[in-house]
């Protein structure tokens, strides 16, 4: 089995692009902290929206879907799930809520990761819930002509428990000794977790939940207000490309994890930038029409009513709809399609 030694990370020479991403995240995190102290109550609506988006997007990446209405009912009203997909979605909701409420009381150990995995499957009968894999798994791709190719072979089942222990021990050691920049330690841990692929099912979703947990435990709270999972889902191909590049040579300890680290850091930074944009819209008490107008001015290309609702969490659905109608009537926006396929774009 490969040797996990995170002390080696501190001696690596990182390029200026990667270090620039780290510096930019700290700058944005500082701004967020200031805003949270000044106007905490205005941001509570962003928390609820982010929970819905995170649960929906992380499951959708794995092909687990339901309607927008049901997602909101499952996440916000804690409705009972009706089918297998909804059982998986409800499990994700439960783990995410635990992380939101108790991140500082969840140590990074194999035992706790197994407990979170058990909760992920708590709404269904899965005998492997909370247990590491008992069969060899493979990361593969299916191509348009129908053929499937194995891209990466994770660790064997018998190696997995010890490997999970090792990455947890190494992560805790370098964080505790302040040997490695936390943002880099987090991304390396998540990369190793995905290469170990410790479960029969749920590895991708667990990796995204653990990303949020590790960020919170290190003082990076952007995922509370902006969904990191939604950002990953939007650029799913980039995620898989970066992971694929970083997995080459992993078993021998010869991988170049930089593409994956940059991808994840870029995603975190993009979420912080989104937070700044949304804060600008809730910061000043403007009439609904002006709030929606400003939200649409920040959009390039086509967008939906839901896109604008997310930018204007302080407004009701009817206020957003009314403002969009007025902006279409005045010629500022052009509307296309009908029903769920309605899209808008700026005319001027």
Image (cartoon, rainbow, N blue to C red):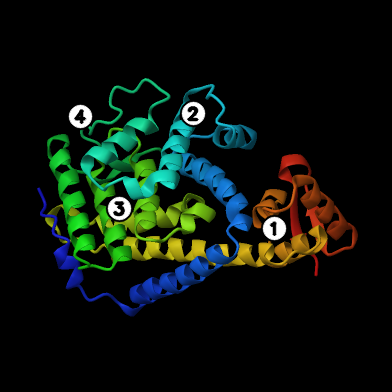
Q: Mark 3 and mark 1 in contact (Cβ < 8 Å)?
A: no
Q: CA–CA distance between discs 1 and 4?
A: 46 Å
In the picture, the quarter occupied by the C terminus is bottom right
Q: Nearer the viewer, mark 1 or mark 4?
A: 4
Mark closest to the chain's N terminus, 3 or 2: 2
Identify the residue at image location x=64%, y=34%. 69
* Label 4 element class: loop
Instruction: Please name the residue that numbered disc 1 is placed on.
Output: 302
SS at badge 3: helix
Mark with earlier residue (1, 4): 4
| In-image side of 212 versus 89 (left or right) | left
Q: Which mark is residue 134?
A: 4
Considering every residue shown, the one lying at the far bottom of the view is 16
Residue of label 3: 190
Eye-nearest disc, 3 or 4:
3
Work out whether mark 2 precedes mark 4 in sequence or the reverse, and give the earlier one: 2
| Position of residue 291 measured from the top left corner of the image (x, y, whole percent) | 75, 62
Identify the mark at residue 85; answer none if there is no mark. 2
| Left-right relation of 208 to 82 | left
Binning the other alpha carbons within 10 Å of mark 3 as few (below 14), some (14 to 19) or many (20 upward) gives many
Q: CA distance from mark 2 to mark 4?
A: 23 Å
| Residue at the image position 16 percent from the left and 45 percent from the top | 165
Closer to the chain start, of discs 1 and 2, is 2
Numbered disc 1: secondary structure: loop
Ranked by sequence position, the earlier of labels 3 and 4 is 4
Q: Quick check: 315 left or right of 148?
A: right
Residue 204: percent from left, percent from top = 36, 43
Is residue 27 at least partly visible in the picture? Answer: yes
Characterize the local packing of mark 4: few (<14), some (14-19) or many (20 or more) Cα atoms within 10 angstroms.
Answer: some
Q: Quadrant of residue 6?
A: bottom left
């Amino acid at each position: 089995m490969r040797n996990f030694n995170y002390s080696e990370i501190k001696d690596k020479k990182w390029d200026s692009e990667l270090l620039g991403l780290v510096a930019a995240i700290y700058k944005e995190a500082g701004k967020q902290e200031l805003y949270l102290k000044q106007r905490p109550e205005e941001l509570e609506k962003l928390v609820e929206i982010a929970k819905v988006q995170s649960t929906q997007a992380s499951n959708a990446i794995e092909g687990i879907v339901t309607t927008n209405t049901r997602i909101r009912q499952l996440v916000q009203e804690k409705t009972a799930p009706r089918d297998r997909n909804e059982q998986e979605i409800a499990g994700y909701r439960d783990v995410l809520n635990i992380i939101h409420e108790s991140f500082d009381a969840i140590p990074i150990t194999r035992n706790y990761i197994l407990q979170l995995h058990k909760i992920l499957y708590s709404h269904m009968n899965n005998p492997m819930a909370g247990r590491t894999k008992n069969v060899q798994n493979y990361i593969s791709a299916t191509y348009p002509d129908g053929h499937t190719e194995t891209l990466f072979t994770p660790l064997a089942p018998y190696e997995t428990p010890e490997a999970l222990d090792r990455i947890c021990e190494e992560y805790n050691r370098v964080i505790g000794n302040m040997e490695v920049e936390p943002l880099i330690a987090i991304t390396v841990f998540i990369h190793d977790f995905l290469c170990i692929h410790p479960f029969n099912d749920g590895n991708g979703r667990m990796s995204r939940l653990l990303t949020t947990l590790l960020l919170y435990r290190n003082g990076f709270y952007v995922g509370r207000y902006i969904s990191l999972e939604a950002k990953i889902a939007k650029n799913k191909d980039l995620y898989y490309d970066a992971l694929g590049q970083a997995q080459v040579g992993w078993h021998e300890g010869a991988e170049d994890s930089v593409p994956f680290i940059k991808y994840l850091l870029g995603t975190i930074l993009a979420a912080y930038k989104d937070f700044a944009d949304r804060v600008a819209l809730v910061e000043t008490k403007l009439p609904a029409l002006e709030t929606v107008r400003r939200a649409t001015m920040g959009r390039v290309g086509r967008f939906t009513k839901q896109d604008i609702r997310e930018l204007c969490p302080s407004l009701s659905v009817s206020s957003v709809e009314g403002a969009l109608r007025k902006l279409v009537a005045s010629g500022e926006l052009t509307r296309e399609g009908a029903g769920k396929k309605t899209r808008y774009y700026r005319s001027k």
